[in-house]
Image: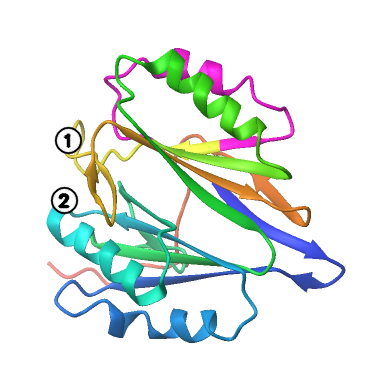
Amino acid sequence: MHTIDGLEGMGIFMKQMLVEINRGAPAAGQLTDILKEYQTGKYKTILFHIFSGVADEAGLVQLAREIEQYFGTELIAGTMSAGEIKDGMMIEPGVLVSAILFERSDISILRIDGVKGNEIAIGKRVREALDAVPDLKAAELLFPGTEADTEHMYAEISRCRKDIDIFGGYPGGHKLNSPEHFIFDGSGAMYDTMLVITYAGKDLHFDMDKSIGWISLGMPSRVCQLMI
C-alpha cells in the first residue's frame, strides 16, 4: 500500500479521483468530473492507473486510448487486478480508473520490452535510468509475468540510490494461476514488458507500508436476521 503526498505548510499538492467504469457506456462521459478538475489549471501532471478484474483485452486497450484522446496524455498504466477497492470496500470484478493530479511533481513512464531472458541487463538499465532522474522520490514497477528471473532483475534495480522508494505489483487477476496477467496502455496489451513509473519533485513525499495476512475492509456491520 502506498500514499503519495506533497506537503508545504498546509498546502496539498496532489489529488486522487476514482471512477468505477460502466463498460456499456463511453468512457468520456464517465470521466467528466476528473476532466473538470484537471482543467482548473492548478495541476502540472495527471497520471492514470486502470485496474481491471475482467480480462477484456480489446476493451481495456480501447479505454486507455479514449483516456489518451480525452485528456491528451500518455501517462496511463493499466494492469489486471485481483481486487478493485473503492471507498474502502471491495467492488464486484470490474474496471476502476484512478487519476492522480499533481500540482508540482514530474511524472514519467518508461516502457521496457523484451524482459524475459534479459533480466539482469534490464535491471541494470532500469537502475541507471532511476539514478539519472533529478529529485526522484519513488519508482513504481509493473511487470506481468513470473516466468522471468525477477529475483536477479529486482536485485539489480535495488542497487539504485537509497533515497528512492521502489514499489509495484504483479497483475495476477482474480483467478488463481490465471494466464491472463497482462499490463496495458493505449498501444496494446503487454505480456513481456515492464512499465516503470517515476515520481519526482522536491516537495513530493512518499509514505509506504505493507501488510501480511487478512485485514477487514468496509464499514462494521451486524447480522440482525437469518432467513432460511
Q: Residue at x 72, y 27 (%)?
A: 162
Q: From the image, tell me which residue sits under label 1.
A: 178
Q: Give, as a single range, the part of the protein colored magenta.
A: 143-166
At which x and y percent is residue 89? 40, 63
At which x and y percent is residue 158? 59, 22
How crowded pointer 1 is (Cα within 10 Å; few <14, some 14-19, many 20+) is rated as: few
Color style of the picture: rainbow
Judged left or right of residue 76, residue 147 is left
Q: CA distance from mark 1 to mark 2?
A: 10 Å
Looking at the image, the residue that sits furthest to the right is 9
Q: What amino acid is found at the position of numbered circle 1 in the picture?
A: Ser
Q: Is residue 121 visible?
A: yes
Nearest to the observer: residue 128 or residue 80: 128
Q: From the image, tell me which residue sits under label 2.
A: 55
Please tell me whether residue 225 is drawn above or below residue 113 in the rendered image: below
Judged left or right of residue 187, residue 198 is right
**Mark drawn on residue 124:** none
Q: Residue at x 69, y 43 (%)?
A: 137
Q: What amino acid is found at the position of numbered circle 2 in the picture?
A: Ala
Q: Earlier in the sequence, mark 1 or mark 2?
A: 2
